[in-house]
Amino acid sequence: MDTQLVELDLADWTAAKANGAWIAALEAGKVLYFPRLAFELLPEERGLLTPAVLSPDVRNISLNADGKLKGAAGDDAVQRAVAAMVSRFREQAQQLINGLLPHYTPALRLAPTSYRPAQVETRVQSWRADDKRLHVDSFPSRPNYGERILRVFTNANPDGLPRVWRVGEPFEAVAARFLPRAKPYVGWQAKLMRALRVTKSLRSEYDHLMLQLHDGMKSDLEYQKTSPQQTVSFPAGSVWVCFSDQTSHAVMSGQYMLEQTLHLAAAKQYNPNSSPLAILSRLTGRNLV
C-alpha cells in the first residue's frame, strides 16, 4: 500500500497556502502531516496538562461554538484557563484550514473543539467504541447525509511522547470490501428510530451504510490484523489533518491531544466526486440521501 501521509514543511499557522496536490491528497483520504507546526502552550497552560482536569466518566473536554465548556474538572479559574487554551487552538486550526483550503471557508460549519488529556492505552471501551480498531468515523445517533468530517489534530504531550495511529487502506477499497456484507437499509426502521429518538433525525441510506462500514471494520479482527495499513507516530509538537469519515484510522497510544472538527457539505469540496457519498453512490448505483 502506498503511504497515506503527505508531509508538509509548514511552521506558521497563518502561512498555509492552497496547493492543488495537497488538496487532492486530502480529498482522496490521505493525511496531511505538519511535523513542525506546533501548538505552543503559554507558561500558565502547562499545569493543565494533567488528567485531573478531566471530569470523571467522560472521554474528553469540549468547547462548543458558543463558548460553553463541557467535561472539565476544577474550580472557576481552572475552567477559564482550559477554555482559553482550547479556544486559542480553535483559532489557530481555523487559520490553518482557511489558508490551506480557502474554497471551503464560506461553507464550513464549526463543531466543538476537544482537549483529550486521557491516556489512550488504558481506556476500556466496547468494541464499537474502541478507537484502537481501524474505522472510518460515523455516528449512530447523528445522521449527516454525506456532510464531511474534517479534523485538525495536534499532539501537545509535555513529555515528548508520540500519538500513534494506524492508517489503513483507501476508502474505496474499504467500501468494496465491506459493502457486500452490509445489511440492507430499511426505511420503516429508520422512521422508528427517529420516532423513538434513537437518532436525532431520519437516518439516510448513506448514514446506514457508513455505520455498516464502521461496524464491519471494527468487528473483523482478521481485517484489523492483516489489512493494508501503516503505523504512524505523530510526535509532540506536530499537527495532522484528515477527513476522518474517509481516512481509515485507529488511535493506538498517546495523551494530551487537541482536536478541531469542521463540517463541510460534500458538494462544497474542490472535487465532490471524491467524497464518501459519491463513492458509495457510485458503488451502489443509486442516490443515498
Image (cartoon, helix red, strand yellow):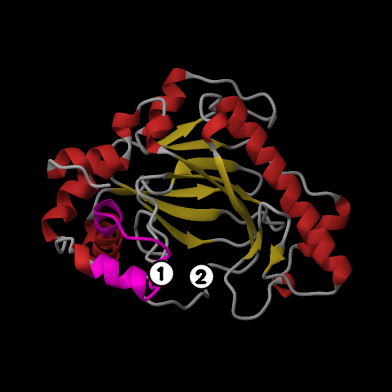
The answer to which image quadrant residue 45 occupies is bottom right
- The image shows residue 140 at horizontal and vertical percentages of 37, 65
The answer to whether residue 170 of the structure is visible from this angle is: no
Q: How many marks?
A: 2
Q: Position of residue 207 (x, y in %)?
A: 31, 55
Q: Residue at x 70, y 28 (%)?
A: 14
Whether residue 246 is visible: yes
Which of 63 and 175 lies nearest the eye of the viewer? 63
Mark 1 or mark 2: name the one nearer the start of the chain. Answer: 2
Whether residue 186 sits left or right of residue 236 in the image: it is left
Q: Which residue is mark 1?
A: 130
Category of crowding for the residue at label 2, using alpha-carbon neighbours closer than 10 angstroms: few (below 14), some (14–19), many (at least 20): few
Image quadrant of residue 21?
top left
Q: Which mark is residue 167?
A: none
Tag 1 secondary structure: loop
Q: Amino acid at mark 2?
A: Glu
Q: In this picture, is 272 found above or below 201?
A: above
Residue at 65% over, 61% down: 62
User: Gap between marks 1 and 2, in whole Å?
Assistant: 11 Å
**Element type where label 2 sits in the image:** loop
Q: Residue at x 23, y 49 (%)?
A: 174
Q: Residue at x 67, y 70 (%)?
A: 71
Q: Position of residue 134 (x, y in %)?
A: 34, 58
Q: Mark 1–mark 2 contact, CB under 8 Å?
A: no
- Magenta region: which residues? 189-209
Q: Where the N terminus falls, by quadrant?
A: top left
Amino acid on which the number 1 mark rests in the picture: Asp
Judging by the rendered image, the residue that carries numbered circle 2 is 121
